[in-house]
Amino acid sequence: MLLTPQPRKISKLEWSVLAVLAASVVLSFIAVPALAGDGLLHVWFLDVGQGDAIFIQAPNGNQVLVDGGPDNKVLQELGRIMPFNDRSIDALVLSHPHADHLRGLIEVLKNYEVGKVLENKISCGSPECAEWDKTKQKSETVQAEAGQAIDLGGGVKLKVIYARQPDARANAAKNAHDYMLITKLEYGGESLLLTGDAEKKIEQILAASGDLRAQFLKVGHHGSKTSTTAQFLDTVKPELAFIELGARNQYGFPHPEVIKRLEDFGIKYYRTDMSGTVELVLDGRNYLIKEAKY
């Protein structure tokens, strides 16, 4: 049985690019001094309504937030998890600049000290993008590239496995999903694939790119029928899946076809609209699931 004592953060970390080896850029945390964790990897799929927000804490206490949801509800959810005196997060990762992933990150930047921001920067003319560009200036921003790996310490790495480089055609209003930043969290023999709003086109590219297997899968695009194809599931072969979405959302997510595909493959799934925030706890070999249901 895994135990999950309340994490404590005792200092702030800095990042630096250490090296480029075999086409892999390693972004490493340099402790000043190290953080105190509980020796376990925690991943919270935050209940932020119709949007994505995934909070990660490494065994040594380093913290990363992947996407932030559609509004400031992410602050409430972080407040449930983080000690009241912890006002810093080591890194933010933006999968793509749509409001249901971006707005919450803006609120986090306003309320927390953030060490670094990782994104695949594409053209975006929305008001929230303008605010994002302004607010993130107090943090160091890194352009995402496939092959990068964020070393969280404690044997945990967050790898960038897809980040199509922006070009003249890249536009958040038209084709942001084609420039999705997709990452894979690895710890020991366990891994979690974070797909953002990736759809069939990117899933096919990923499926053809090599070993994509992961024990855990964050379902793409909130359970839209344009994602989570049978081919993709057969390639990833997840044991558990997590769907982030709002209750009674206007889009009808998750689509019944996606649920059927998950069930046909024998994949157990958790939904934030039903379970609230879902916590995945890992020790590198075993896992534990906690559902908030508040």
Image: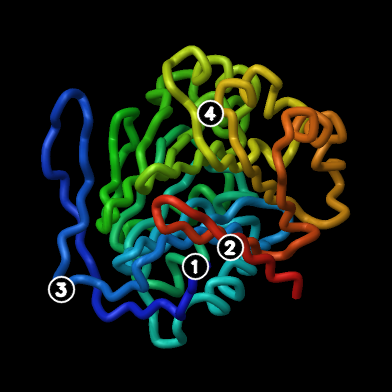
> Would residue 111 be found to the left or right of residue 141 on screen?
right
Q: Return the residue found at the far front.
A: 1
How far apart, in angstroms, are the residues tagged by discs 2 and 4?
A: 34 Å
Task: Locate residue 170, reporting x and y percent.
Answer: 49, 24
Q: Please state which amino acid type lies under the numbered disc 1.
A: Leu
**Circle 2 residues within 10 Å: few <14, some 14–19, many ≥20:** some
Question: Nearer the viewer's eye, disc 2 or disc 4?
Answer: 2
The earlier-in-sequence mark between 2 and 4 is: 4
> Would residue 135 be found to the left or right of residue 71 on screen?
left
Pointer 3 residue: 33
The earlier-in-sequence mark between 2 and 3 is: 3
Task: Locate residue 145, reporting x and y percent.
Answer: 32, 31
Residue for point 80% across, 59% down: 274
**Circle 3 residues within 10 Å: few <14, some 14–19, many ≥20:** few
Pointer 4 residue: 171
Question: Nearer the viewer's eye, disc 1 or disc 3?
Answer: 1
Pointer 1 residue: 2
Q: Please state which amino acid type lies under the numbered disc 2.
A: Glu
Q: Please state which amino acid type lies under the numbered disc 3.
A: Pro
The earlier-in-sequence mark between 3 and 4 is: 3
